[in-house]
Image (cartoon, helix red, strand yellow):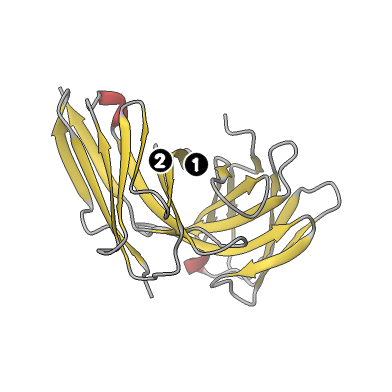
């Protein structure tokens, strides 16, 4: 049962433009959401997170938006840079001992 | 460098064998998680330990077991290996059982 879904397996964007990655979830008990970035042959790296009590969190070029009623979150990267080319995973937690449940990932390619 | 160390980086073994994967968490982190990433799959949660105690189990096969030692390092034991067990195995750690976890570089297991 896939409770966290990233329906776009890939995204291509021009350097300098905005990248928008989407994530949907089905479990209304999720209360903490995270985005990870993964390069080949490396472990996932934490990017940004958001608690369910907020609807937006910003960190530099990265902004995460949460729409609880729609059970949807998105990650905006502005401006996109070639170094942003990686796989991005959305993840969610339910409680204090909550395992991270990951989406399948979106491969982002930033072209010059 | 996340501060999480996994050894070995690569492992090739035959079907039916048993292997042990090792993880040293970041200094001070009490939680250790194990995840499996098979080809073209997302990250699947296996098990979570907090300060030596098992806290949550995911879709971990009975042939797999794990433990966390008093010095907080953890080992994942995989036995009676099958071809389908070939995957990347990631360890992650966090200070508590919550919020962002920091991932190691993974162990690539190939069963032949």
Helix, strand or loop at mark 1: loop
Task: Point out the image quarter for the N terminus of chain A.
Answer: bottom left
As drawn, the residue found furthest toward the right would be B70
Mark 1 is surrounded, within 10 Å at the Cα level, by few (under 14), some (14 to 19) or many (20 or more) other residues, namely many
Q: Pointer 2: what residue?
A: A38
Q: Pointer 1: what residue?
A: A43
In the figure, is residue B51 to the left or right of B81?
right
Residue A59, given in percent of the width and then of the height, sits at: 38, 30
Residue lying at 44% horizontally and 58% vertically, measured from the top left: A92
Closer-to-camera residue (A10/A25): A25
Q: Are marks 1 and 2 in contact (CB under 8 Å)?
A: yes
Residue lying at 42% horizontally and 53% vertically, measured from the top left: A53
State which chain disc 1 sits on: A
Residue A94, given in percent of the width and then of the height, sits at: 50, 64
State which chain disc 2 sits on: A
For marks 1 and 2 on the same chain, the one whose residue lies earlier in the sequence: 2
Q: Relative to B4, say whether A81 is above or below.
A: above
């Amino acid at each position: 049962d896939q409770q966290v879904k990233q329906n776009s397996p890939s995204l291509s964007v021009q350097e300098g433009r905005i990248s928008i990655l989407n994530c949907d979830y089905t479990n209304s008990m999720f209360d903490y959401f995270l985005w990870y970035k993964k390069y080949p042959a490396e472990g996932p790296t934490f990017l940004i997170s958001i608690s369910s009590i907020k609807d937006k969190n910003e960190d530099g070029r990265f902004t995460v938006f949460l729409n609880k009623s729609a059970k949807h979150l998105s990650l905006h990267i502005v401006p996109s840079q070639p170094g942003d080319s990686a796989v991005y995973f959305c993840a969610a937690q339910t409680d204090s001992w909550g395992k991270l449940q990951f989406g399948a990932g979106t491969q982002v390619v930033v072209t010059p | 460098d996340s501060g999480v160390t996994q050894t070995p980086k690569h492992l090739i073994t035959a079907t039916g064998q048993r292997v042990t994967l090792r993880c040293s968490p970041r200094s001070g982190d009490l939680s250790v998680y194990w995840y499996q990433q098979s080809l073209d799959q997302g990250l699947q949660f296996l098990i979570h330990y907090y300060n030596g105690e098992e806290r949550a189990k995911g879709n971990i096969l009975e042939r797999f077991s794990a433990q966390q030692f008093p010095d907080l390092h953890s080992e994942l034991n995989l036995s009676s290996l099958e071809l389908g067990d070939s995957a990347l195995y990631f360890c992650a750690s966090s200070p508590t059982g919550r919020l962002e976890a920091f991932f190691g570089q993974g162990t690539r297991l190939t069963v032949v």
